[in-house]
Amino acid sequence: MAKKKQIELTIEEKLQNALVPKEEQPYKIPNNWCWTRLEFLSNIINGDRGKNYPSKKDYVKSGVPFITAGNIEKNNTLNKEKLNYILEDKYNILRSGKIVKDDILYCLRGTLGKNAIIDFEFKGAIASSLCIVRLLNKINKKYIYLCLNSMLIEHQMIEFNNGTAQPNLSAESLKRYKIPLPPIDEQQRIVNRIESLFTKLDKAKELIENTLAQFEQNKMAILHKAFTGELTVKWRKENNIDLSSWQNYQLKDICEKITDGTHQTPKYTDDGGYIFLSSKNVKSGKIDWKNIKYIPKDLHDILYERIAPQRDDILLAKNGTTGVAAIVDRDIIFDIYVSLALLRVNKKYILPMFLLYVIGSPRIKNYFDSNLKGIGVPNLHLKYIREATISVPTIEEQQEIVNILDNLLAKYNKIKNLEQQLEKIELLKKAILAKAFRGELGTNNPDEESAENLLKEILAEK
């Protein structure tokens, strides 16, 4: 039976299919812009899913790069140092997913929406966790790249996410993304304006990061001096005490309790219950009591009988941000997850604040880091916490060290407030992108030809 001949649509009919109906448009844009979908501005290309798809056994030391989602950093750059490679012969038989300059690589699984633009000559292929957004002629590549990193797309990505345990998008979902399309000259002006503003923000960010790095370096130097006796040389001389008064102990010998929280993932309760802390609640030196979860009474009764946290206990992150510790600074009833270890000192030997500072010192930090176990999420076993060896002076000298460190680090902690400025910079970038794709950067020329005419030209060539 002969196939039915496909009816060729007129350019006006194609245009109407490509335009987003008014009732589906996310928000109002300038009159000479139009709403369309990504599928009409690009080709969306998946990696080869067939029998030719490379597996780990196909990886070689050098050859053609084979890019996975893990090769794209959070700052949307391609990490070239950790690429996998396949042989040229393997690359040549791939049916799709081959990369060319100006392609945008877009993550479909895991960290959804993570992306990178290939703005240099490149030969490679993508894994199934990625797809290629290959933009058509007459479209500014950087404009679409920046749009894909805006909150407009993030909201649509959440809507299209069809994953369960693992976040998941399909290439078909990506095609349906709604894109605000300005005239071609306006696209370039928007790119120029965003890049100019981002350059200034990135310079401010670099200055802040350098200041924080210097702070951390100075802090580590002070802590090193504190726990080698250098910081209290004058005090010992005034008190006629020798450095030989310092004794080495393993933590298990000077702590009354070293344990961890429950290995059971609890069912949380929304209204009331008992406070339940994890490593996410432990910041450097302090506990975040605001962003907490709660567990029901029956589970609390079981946990509290074994752990019973109390004021002056030290909570140490065993996984996630391993080695970060905080002191319990209030009388409050709570329970902890296995990601935290609890250390309760024997105050005959050591002061709680002294131990907290020791845990943050370079030597103990290096010891913990060198004994991390596990793949993916590093874990610090209780065994290595218990066996950590520290030098302990007299209680009087410990108090002197704590006093000195409190005074010195209080000044540095003011600098740590700069971290909030880094968060503000990221929020400013999001605000700039939001304005850009609403036509609110002050760059639009209302007298320019409507973007609908540009879209017609694109559709005529597609």
Image: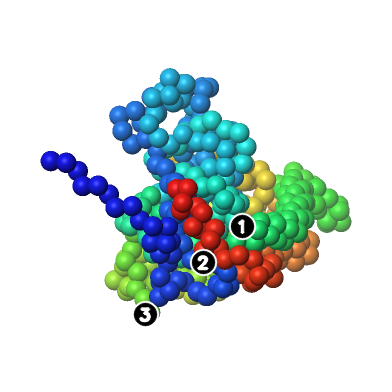
Say which residue label 3 marks. Answer: 271
Query: Image height check: is 405 above or below 385?
Result: below
Say which residue label 2 marks. Answer: 34
Residue appearing at x 38%, y 50% in the figure: 171
- Of residue 58 and residue 408, the one placed in the foreground of this image is 58
Residue appearing at x 55%, y 47% in the figure: 137
Asked which quadrant contains residue 143, the reply is bottom right
Instruction: Say whether disc 2 or disc 3 marks the residue closer to the N-terminus.
Output: 2
Identify the coloring.
Answer: rainbow
Q: Nearer the viewer, mark 2 or mark 3?
A: 2
**Crowdedness near tag 3: few (<14), some (14–19) or many (≥20) residues, C-alpha within 10 Å:** few
- Left or right: where 28 falls relative to 294: right
Q: Can you give x and y, in whole percent of width and height, for residue 181 in the image?
A: 54, 62
Residue appearing at x 50%, y 36% in the figure: 99
Q: Mark 3 belongs to which amino acid?
A: Asp
Instruction: Say whether disc 1 or disc 2 marks the residue closer to the N-terminus.
Output: 2
Query: Image height check: is 144 above or below 43?
Result: below
Q: Secondary structure at mark 1?
A: helix
Q: Can you give x and y, in whole percent of width and height, for residue 228 in the image?
A: 74, 45
Q: Secondary structure at mark 3?
A: loop
Kindly identify which numbered label has been placed on residue 184. Answer: 1
Which residue ends up furthest to the left in the rendered image? 1
- Of residue 143 and residue 422, the one placed in the foreground of this image is 143
Q: Secondary structure at mark 2?
A: strand
Residue appearing at x 53%, y 61% in the figure: 453
Q: Can you give x and y, in whole percent of width and height, for residue 435 in the image?
A: 61, 69
Asked which quadrant contains residue 267, the reply is bottom left
Instruction: Say whether disc 3 or disc 1 marks the residue closer to the N-terminus.
Output: 1
